[in-house]
Image: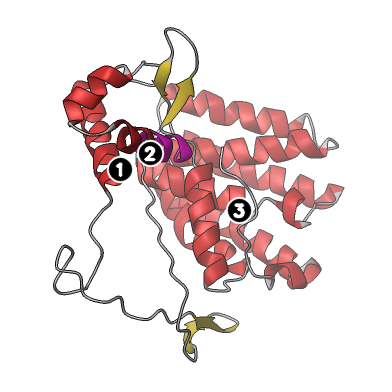
Amino acid sequence: MIIFHNVEVAVSGATSPTLIPFQGGAVPAPQWPDPAPDRRGSPLTGSRPPKAAMLVAQRIVRDIARTGLRPGALLPPERAMLETYETGRGTLREALRLLEFQGVIALKPGPGGGPILLNPAASHLASVLQLLMQLNQAPYRAIVEARLALEPVISQLAAERIGGESLAELAGSVEQMRGNLDDRDWFRDADKRFHDVIARASGNVLFAYIADALLSILDGTVIGIDYPGDRRAAILRAHEEIHAAIARHDAPAAGERMREHIEAYARYAQRKFPEILDQAITWDRLPG
């Protein structure tokens, strides 16, 4: 699964902001001036044409998908790629840098090196979402609302589709949490692993990336939300109930237990850390 994020922001000629509705208040939406029409772009939107390097990067990805290359595969050497894509060395290297920044490839130096295909992590999606949220001054509670909307559906799908290997991994995350209630780092790792396994078990790769990205943005230890012992015990009980529902393939129960779990988290965070939930999300962590 390859994900591209092409974000171009031109800030000039600022105008008075309008307001867009947001639960808990309204946030200003930046107003960008309409770009001047460009006959090489869209006549309807005035959009700029894609850069040559982006077009080459997109062709590389199409060829990766067409040939069925898997993570760890070495892409063709530079000389072969220059001939295949009929482009200059500077454009090709810029295209490869675009893919490297997105986590699609790593550039291995030295003889026998070159671009190595990777499986992009959800942190790249999280980084782009953080950028967009900061530009719109969206608070962290937006992530809580998104999780509340998505994760019950994801849990229902997981209950219907989960296989034996994923079910064993889910049980392992519950055991890890049960055995490490007093270790913040192990507990947090087990918590994230639990939700990641469910998202992947849904069979929907988009849900898997989105859930992983949202969890990365709303990392409690990074933004200052932590749990006392009684709260950790309550999270463990919720995970046990969700795991039991998924294990018996009870989709409605899995969705309902997950909804209750996220709602309990939202109530706790609102009661103990309302100022954190109201903070604007910032684009301050590198992907990877």
Residue at the disc numbered 3: 217
The question of residue 191 being in magenta is answered with no
Foreground residue, 15 or 152? 15
Mark in the foreground, 3 or 2? 2
Q: Say if mark 2 contacts mark 1, CB within 8 Å.
A: yes
**Type of the residue with mark 2:** Glu
Quadrant for the C terminus, please.
top right
Quadrant for the N terminus, please.
top left
Where does residue 140 sit, x and y in percent of width and height? 63, 65
Residue 254 visible somewhere in the drawing: no
Q: Secondary structure at mark 2?
A: helix
Residue 243 relative to residue 199: left or right:
right
Residue at the disc numbered 2: 94
Residue 102 relative to residue 236: left or right:
left
**Type of the residue with mark 1:** Ala
Foreground residue, 179 or 273? 273
Task: Judge the density around disc 2: few (<14), some (14-19), many (≥20) Cα neighbours within 10 Å.
Answer: some
Q: Secondary structure at mark 1?
A: helix
Q: How is the image coloured?
A: secondary structure
* 264 vs 106: above or below: below
Foreground residue, 25 or 36? 36
Where does residue 50 sit, x and y in percent of width and height? 25, 54
Inter-mark Cα distance, 2 to 1: 6 Å
Segment tinted magenta in the rendering: 95-102
Residue at the disc numbered 1: 53
First reached walking from the N terminus: tag 3 or tag 2: 2
Where does residue 187 sit, x and y in percent of width and height? 74, 37
What residue appears at the point 44 percent right and 40 percent down from the top-left corner? 102
What residue appears at the point 19 percent right and 31 percent down from the top-left corner? 85
